[in-house]
Amino acid sequence: MSYLNHLFFGIYPYIAFSVFLLGSLVRYDRDQYTWKTGSSQLLESKQLRKGSTAFHIGVIAILLGHFVGLLTPGGVWHALGVSAQFKQMVAMGVGGFFGVICFYGLTILIKRRLSNPRIRATSSKMDITILLMLYAQLILGLISILVSAGHMDGGEMLKLMAWAQNIVIFNGADAAAAVSDVNPIFKLHILLGMTLFLLFPFSRLVHVWSVPLKYFKRNYQVVRSKV
């Protein structure tokens, strides 16, 4: 069991992130025509707009929360006077709020993709697989809130922080040891998250790299109607 724990939580994250980065670079270099969202807006727009807005608001907030919550050193929180217990309560409240928003949006998107014959016909197996994996990951995240409610001391949250921070500094052995005895729900959440990174370059998720931030600093366009 110790070997498997080290494999899944000390080695697998580096495999997943390597494929995530190198695979994205290779796909951008060799298959730029496939670098797109594959939007089905022309086939149906009302449900897409409703589901996509809620999903993106929820998932962006969740990812930012995970990034800040897991990678900010414990010393920083201590210096700010934030206890582990308080941080856990905030994480549960904010994560739950945006998790429900994301769940609402993703439910609409999955129902739309599976029940609309035209959209289903234009969907690849990877499109559906990624959607269902995101759904499962989101459900695991929501369940983890209920698990966390059973122990409000922040202990398991600190172990998850230790895992993430050790992974970042390439200390896989200590990372795996940090989560060796956490609840299985958290372990499944980590594994599925890493697998999503692994599959990222082979799906339409690559469009995340192409967020049009340049639009914010683009000069205004002057549009005049013909007289």
Image: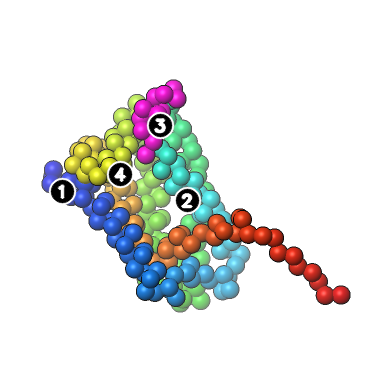
Tell me what residue is drawn at x 32 percent, y 37 percent.
161
Camera-side residue: 214 or 119?
A: 214
Screen quadrant of the N terminus: top left
Which mark sits nearer the N-terminus, 3 or 1?
1
Note whether 194 is above or below 149 in the view shown.
Answer: below
Please identify, in this view, whether the residue under mark 4 or under mark 3 is nearer the observer. Answer: 4
Tell me what residue is drawn at x 61 percent, y 55 percent.
216
User: What is the C-alpha distance between the residues marked 4 and 3?
Assistant: 22 Å
| Secondary structure under the numbered disc 1 in the rendered image | helix
Tell me what residue is drawn at x 30 percent, y 44 percent.
168
Q: Main secondary structure of the magenta part?
A: helix
- Residue 206: image quadrant is bottom left
Q: Give the amino acid type for the residue marked by disc 1 in the picture.
A: Leu
Note whether 81 is above or below 53 in the view shown.
Answer: above
Residue 168's mark? Answer: 4
> Local crowd at mark 1 within 10 Å, few (<14), some, or many (≥20)?
few
| Secondary structure under the numbered disc 2 in the rendered image | helix
- The extreme right residue here reads 227
Describe residue 70's horizontal placement relative to residue 210 as left or right: left
Note whether 223 is above or below 16 in the view shown.
Answer: below
Which mark sits nearer the N-terminus, 4 or 3?
3
Residue 4's mark? Answer: 1
Please identify, in this view, whether the residue under mark 4 or under mark 2 is nearer the observer. Answer: 4
> Local crowd at mark 2 within 10 Å, few (<14), some, or many (≥20)?
many
Q: Which residues are magenta?
A: 71-81
Q: Give the amino acid type for the residue marked by disc 4 in the picture.
A: Val
